[in-house]
Image (tube, coloured by chain):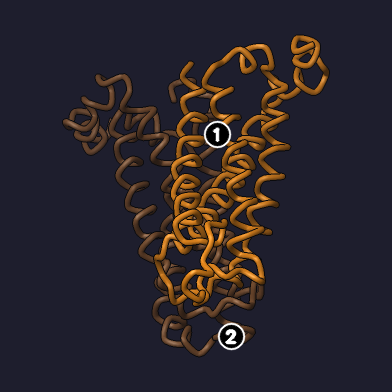
Amino acid sequence: MHPILDWLHDSWLGHIMRDVPWLFPTCEGLHFVGMALLLGTIGIIDLRILGFAKGLPIGPLHRLLPLAFFGFALNVATGIAFVCSDPDSYWIVPAFRFKLLLILLAGANAIWFWVSILKHVDEWGPDVDASRLAKVISAASLLFWTGVVTAGRFIAFAGTGTL
Amino acid sequence: MLEALQNTAFSQWLLVSEYGYPILLTLHSLGLAMLVGVLIVIDLRVLGFVRSIPLLPMKRLMMIVWIAFAVNATSGTMLFAADAVKFASSPTFLLKLSSIAVGVVLAALLSKSTLATNSTYEREVAPGAARITLQSPIVAKSLAALSIVIWIAAIGLGRYMAYE
């Protein structure tokens, strides 16, 4: 297989993920908690921008973003640990590659939000509509993150029987 | 009865179909994310984080929580039906259900009291008038903290079920 996959497999992380029995399930639990923090936070902001719960001002909602970053960091860390446990088995699964692609798209979308929308969020107080562009980006964000979760769940059902 | 449940045509189909099981698991995961994620944000706000977000309008977010709960109760019942005998005898599963029951009661209490339109939770109360109710900071904050712990436990127990 690819040398990078071999290197991940033989890393200390790969070894402990395979050798310590409780580690993999614990990381899975953390991966789901991270998912909830990420999607819950982003979901609230996106749905408010799209017009739900308009009593909430959009500016202060943005202060929740560190919680989303924390969830994302937790999931990158545990996600890398899963892959190191058995890199070849993950890499050959189309759902896994598709999940990585969707994470990149969600990230690019978030950067677009950062660059074009963030400076306006304090203008959108209670009962104020967000801009059309903000709504487009938020709808895309919901779509991408839903896709990430869906692709993630399908990884174990690729039929290889190894994950 | 549990055996009859897992022998129904639906349960049998779920086990052999290519997409039935992963689609239900996906719905269960998305429901989990919105249910627990949104509740933790509300709990953290009650605990005093991000005070710039007005508390009472957050009650509207409870609608997301209840919809997500309905999605997960439904998908969870279907997943249970596929392997009813195993799940019903699993201590982890029963503990997960108990955590969820407590978590739902806590969410309903916070929603109906702390986030109620007439909530005095963050209003100035005349000295001596303060009583220990669900709107008193110490009670509301304890419930919010317990809620976070209990939902993370429910997630952990749910994941652990796959390893029994």
Left or right, residue B66 beside residue A136: right
C-alpha gap between disc 1 and disc 2:
41 Å
For label 1, the crowd category at 10 Å Cα-Cα, with few meaning under 14, some 14 to 19 and many 20 or more, is many
Q: Are marks 1 and 2 in contact (CB under 8 Å)?
A: no
Query: Quarter of the image holding residue B2?
Result: top right
State left or right for residue B25 relative to residue A74: right
Residue with the most extreme right position: B9
Q: Position of residue A69 (x, y in %)?
A: 36, 60
In front: label 1 or label 2: 1
Viewer-closest of A54 and B48:
B48
In terms of secondary structure, where does tag 1 sit? helix
Judging from the image, mark 2 belongs to the subunit labelled A
What's the residue at 58%, 85% (across, down)?
A131
Looking at the rendered structure, the kind of residue marked 2 is Ser
Q: Which chain is orange?
A: B
Chain ID, brown in image = A
Residue that numbered label 1 is attached to:
B99
Q: In terms of depth relative to the viewer, which is nearer, A45 or B57?
A: B57
Q: Which residue is mark 2?
A: A131
Rendering coords of residue A133 (x, y %): 56, 82
A27 vs B24, left or right, is: left
Along the line of sight, which residue is nearer the eye, B88 or A143?
Answer: B88
Q: Chain of mark 1?
A: B
Asked if one can make out residue B88 in the rendered structure from this viewpoint, the answer is yes
Query: At which x and y percent is residue B28?
Result: 62, 39
